[in-house]
Image (cartoon, rainbow, N blue to C red):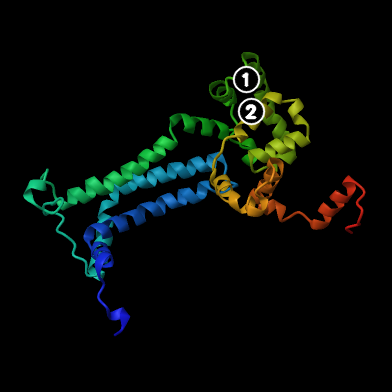
Amino acid sequence: MDIASLPIQGEASGILRAMRTFEFVFCLIMMDKVMKVTEVLCQAVQRKNIDIGEAMKFVQCTKEILQDMRDDGWDDLVMVLAYFCEKHDIVMPDMSARWFDGTGRPCQQKNFITNEHHFHVEVFNAVLDFQLSELNKRFNDRSCELLMLTSTLDPHDKFSLFETQEVLLAKNFYPQDFMHDDLLTLELECAYYKKDMNHDVVFHTLDSLSDLCRLLVQRRKLDFDPMIYRLICLVLTLPISTATTERDLSSMNIIKNKLRNKIEDDFLDDCMVLHIEKEFAEEVDNDYVIQEFEALATPRVKFS
């Protein structure tokens, strides 16, 4: 007897029946629509090269799309549901009929509501409200204010976003790092900072705050604008995404395995850096490493 022709029994049969119910199909299609929106934001904020301003734009756009879906997306969802149910022979209930909770017994019914009210208000709207609530919680007004103020330091387009709100940023969010005299100095530096950067063409092609900070060190401009440099360094400590670090920490077992169970902290730190920045490590030439190693001391055997 062909095994494939045997009837599905037990738990598998129950799962199949549950998957062919309208409630399951409704939740599946609804979450597909919602997760497609949040997936874009999730992937965007995990990029290494994303800056604060761009991240805030993605957050704002995601909020607006979810809000539009909550206000005007119900009819489109019903059309998709009707097509899917008809295609797969799934019974779609009458949305104007009464919703029966539980097993449908009269004693279990608490409110007289329709199927449309249940699926629209208690499920569809509730899910979107939860998504919007989580985004508002993670990106509250104070966090958004901090991120938007830091975006004014962005060197894109010849420092076009730069404003004199850096004093407000330092005063409200870094009071322990800037005393009263430092704030006065920072205010004076801001008046010269943008003009100085605009006159130097080297600073016109920068793409991020980290590039700006690196170039300031190389050109020794931090001696002229120490408060601006301090503020930029503090802004660079703001994590836009911790996904890369979390993935690398979870892979620590690969580095510290049974053969390296007695690895010291310094060596582990070096291995973790190479693992985290593997893209940069792959660009290092082996011959250059050998030459640097030979230059440290006279080896017994020549490597090259």
Between the residue at mark 2 and the residue at mark 1, the CA separation in whole angstroms equals 9 Å
**Figure check: 260 above or below 208:** below
Q: Is residue 84 above or below residue 257?
A: below
Residue at x-position 83% and y-position 57%: 287
The residue carrying pointer 2 sits among few (fewer than 14), some (14 to 19) or many (20 or more) residues within 10 Å by Cα, namely many
Q: Quadrant of residue 211?
A: top right
Q: Residue at x 59, y 20 (%)?
A: 176
- Give whichever of discs 2 and 1 has the lower sequence position: 1
Task: Label 2: state its secondary structure.
Answer: helix
Extreme residue toward the top, this view: 180
Q: Is residue 153 visible?
A: no
Three-letter code, disc 1: Phe
Could you say where residue 138 lies in the image, as x and y percent from the top left? 44, 37
Question: Callout 1 environment at 10 Å: few (<14), some (14 to 19), or many (20+)?
Answer: some
The C terminus, quarter of image: bottom right
Residue 21 seen in render: yes
Q: Position of residue 264 (x, y in %)?
A: 69, 43
Q: Position of residue 302 (x, y in %)?
A: 91, 57
- 162 left or right, relative to 11: right
- Report the amino acid beneath label 2: Leu
Q: Nearer the viewer, residue 262 or 95?
A: 262
Q: Secondary structure at mark 1?
A: loop
For the point 68% across and 37% down, the residue is 212
Instruction: Find residue 163 and report its horizontal and vertical position in percent.
Output: 59, 29
- Which one is in front, 4 or 99? 4
Q: Which residue is mark 1?
A: 178
* Lateral position of residue 21 relative to residue 67, left or right: left
Q: Which residue is mark 2?
A: 231
Q: Is residue 145 left or right of residue 210?
A: left
Q: Are marks 2 and 1 in contact (CB under 8 Å)?
A: yes
